[in-house]
Image: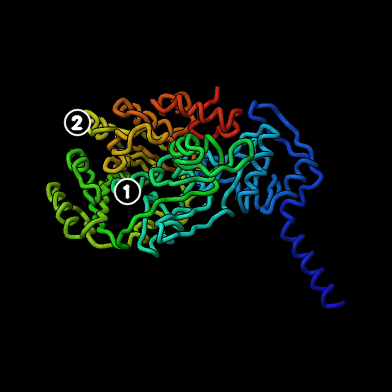
Amino acid sequence: MHRRKFCQATLLAGGALALSPWLRAAGAEVHATTIDGKELNIAAGAVDDLAAGLRGPLLLPGNAAYDEARQVLNPTIDKHPALIVQPSGVADVMRAVQFAQDHRLSTAIKCGGHSASGKGTVNGGLQIDLSRFRHVRVDPGERIAYVSGGSLLGAMDHEALAHGLVTTAGTVSHTGVGGLATGGGFGRLGRKFGLTLDNIRAVEVVSADGRVRRASAEEYPELYWGVRGGGSNFGVVTGFEFQLYPMKREVLLGNFIYPYARLKDALEFYAEFAPNAPDELQTDLIYGFPPGNDQGFVFFQNVYCGKESEGRKVLKQYAKLGKPIKETLAMTDYEVLQRSSDWDAPRSTAAYLKGGFISELPQALIDAIVDGMEPGAGRSTQMIFQQAGGAIARVPTDATAFPHRYAEFNMMATIGWKPDQPGDEHKQWIKSYWRQLQPHTRGFYTVEADDDNASEWDRNYQGNFARMVEVKRRYDPDNIFRLNANVSPS
């Protein structure tokens, strides 16, 4: 065979193999469910047209990659989208959203898959899986990070730190930027630099009409306002511009572990110490029982991003609690620290979470926490306090859609068990425990909320809700994007 013809044939064959995951579906109808709950058969020609207009894959049930793509990290979530689009760029997202609009399909947006309640996938609708749409570029002169919609936090940390720059970016490196940044964004630097969403300079959004818009304080300001706290209510965020700040790569890490018997003392210390800490210090508290262990633990993690000598002076206050079982007090590479909470097998544990914001930690709440917590067979139970305040609290309540500037802590009760075990008993236990604590809360973090909170979305957005409804009516009047802390346009 002539060399040129041989190469052409080889390339064509290779292309067919690369395209085969969605070409196998050609000629087949797709069974779906509309946003109204009606059954729908999408014609084969419409599906083929969608596939032909994409650079990234279109996955259908039965395709080799479908089952992996539909999964989120919580193994208790088992949903089956009618179609999955894995965009390679903004044009693919635009086409996918227009397809969802044309066929009235609920649309799930998956980035890192961390949504505990499984908001990144859907039964019978369209899932947009952004895992192929990841890129981070840093402009060190302007101190801006340009981040594609499917990127993970670890990539943003890595690229920014190469230039001695940072921004608040969660606590687990494989978290998706999109879900965290549009819902809030707590992290180890939040008290110094604000929430992740406080550092969004601009976003690129594909709204329900399939159009892409760049929204900032100057362009589409209402969309810019709503995206910062409204999650995916208004569309798919395909790009972010984040403000970055100079910071030395090493921070002071202070980890202190105490016996569970000191829990009440630890909470009373935390209630006094944390609200008065400097902005440079993030101090979080975790306590509970690992699976099969009734001894329990109390764990403080402190991260100080200022001068080492000043940080060590602040952390000397832990001497009031006495000698810990284990102590780590050392300068630590921030990027390494950001990976320290990652887990290698994220689907190995089923989990359920209840959470809420508190503005103080009064004695009545401390007593309820201590009296109600207990170990249990086949489960791990934990309480987590993530500190807020500082720069987070100094942003006006109506400056973004996120209204919870009063919060001193995000308080979370979590339970975990093996995925092959029934989970109803474990869920009921944590819900019962949470009922004793919930009266002390005011609002909750929408990133962590589940369908139990659906009747509270409007109250949770508080004074910002009416404005959010107006933004929703403008950019998603049919509520295609409803798999979130949903704002109904009607």
User: In the image, 63: left or right of 297?
Assistant: right
**Closer-to-camera residue (5/146):** 146
Q: In the rendering, which numbered label is found on residue 230?
A: none
Mark toward the viewer: 2 or 1: 1
Label 1 crowd (10 A; few <14 / some 14-19 / many >=20): many
Q: In the rendering, which numbered label is found on residue 363?
A: 2
- Would you place residue 31 above or below residue 4 in this image? above
Residue at 62% in and 34% down: 106
Q: Residue at label 1? A: 193
Q: Residue 60's image quarter?
A: top right
Sequence-earlier tag: 2 or 1: 1
Q: Which amino acid does label 2 sit on?
A: Gln
Q: What residue type is labelled 1?
A: Phe
- Would you place residue 370 above or below residue 16 in this image? above
Residue 345, x across and y down, in percent? 48, 54
**Closer-to-camera residue (421/47):** 47
- Would you place residue 188 above or below residue 221 in this image? below
**Closer-to-camera residue (385/309):** 309
Q: Do the residues labelled 2 and 1 touch (CB within 8 Å)?
A: no
